[in-house]
Amino acid sequence: MSFNEGSQLDPSQVEDRRGGGGGRFGRGTMIGGGLGGAILVLVLSLLGVNPSILNDLTGGGQDSGQQQPVGTAGGTSECRTGADASARLDCRIVGTVNSVNAFWSGYLPQQGVKYTKPQAVIFSGRTQTACGPASTAVGPFYCPSDTTAYFDPGFFDELVNRFGSSGGPLAQEYVVAHEFGHHVQDLIGTLGYAQKDPQGPQSGSVRVELQADCFAGMWAHHASTTPDPATGKPYLQPITQKDVQDALSAAASVGDDRIQQAATGRVSPESYTHGTSQQRQTWFMRGFSSGDINQCNTLVGSV
């Protein structure tokens, strides 16, 4: 999805730590919010990306040529307009954060839930969090202990070059919206289900990840009508079929079965934590087609 050039970005919603030396939290800080240490990687791994698998993978995807310059010179303080979001990946992250916050700020109160904006951090290489140290290999993640979503723009190269995802805008925006979906789960009380049953094709962890995919689809459904508070006009242009295919490509590329097959040559459903490629696509489309949070209940029935 492309940003409307006249939309006004709010870079204050994203902290840019690139080159800043490490972050705010000590190495010994443990993950909180009722999520035990055994679930740390589950919560931190964005889209089924196990750090050891990331290190093992050596290729397989083709660059679509759509990747945008990261644009670190002036940091995200330079991200001011929709045109910036279309030109630079870090500004696209800022713009997506703005849009996702605007959507959930309007939608959740209609469901009787107050939306509090999470923090968002862009980092490079590694950073410290309330859930412990993190690196690019972990992938983007949400830390419930500091209610912060973390993004290393370098991961989006991994998504294309190692996992075979499209490099299109909605593939990248889906990643951001997925992480903010975990924050919504934190607010409505479903995030903790991941702890109850951490592995397996019908496990709590898979259900939580698929719900975050559905929430990302919900945002995509409403994105082109969610107004920029500064201008009253939408942040994003209407979604196209190509945009949808980009998002589905990203969802498929990080399914448990796809990653396991690429890393080990075999698929082990008993160790699933995020869902198959098909499941991830299905639940994204469930949210996208309906735009309704009541259609995203992955916690009952078969997923």
Image (cartoon, helix red, strand yellow):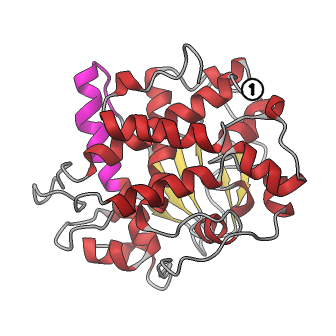
Amino acid type, residue under disc 1 in the picture:
Pro
Q: How many marks?
A: 1
Q: Position of residue 43 (x, y in %)?
A: 66, 38
Q: Does the magenta run of residues contain 104?
A: yes
Q: Position of residue 12 (x, y in %)?
A: 35, 60
Q: Does the magenta run of residues contain 281?
A: no
Q: Residue at x 27, y 38 (%)?
A: 105
Q: Is residue 248 left or right of residue 132?
A: left
Q: Which residues are magenta?
A: 98-115
Q: Is residue 21 visible?
A: no
Please name the residue that numbered disc 1 is placed on: 198
Decide: is 171 above or below 141.
Answer: below
Q: Is residue 250 left or right of residue 231?
A: right
Q: Residue at x 48, y 86 (%)?
A: 73
Task: Classify residue 75 by image quadrant.
Answer: bottom left
Task: Classify residue 197 by image quadrant.
Answer: top right
Decide: is 226 above or below 30.
Answer: below
Decide: is 250 above or below 298.
Answer: below
Name the quadrant of the C terminus.
top right
Decide: is 73 above or below 128.
Answer: below
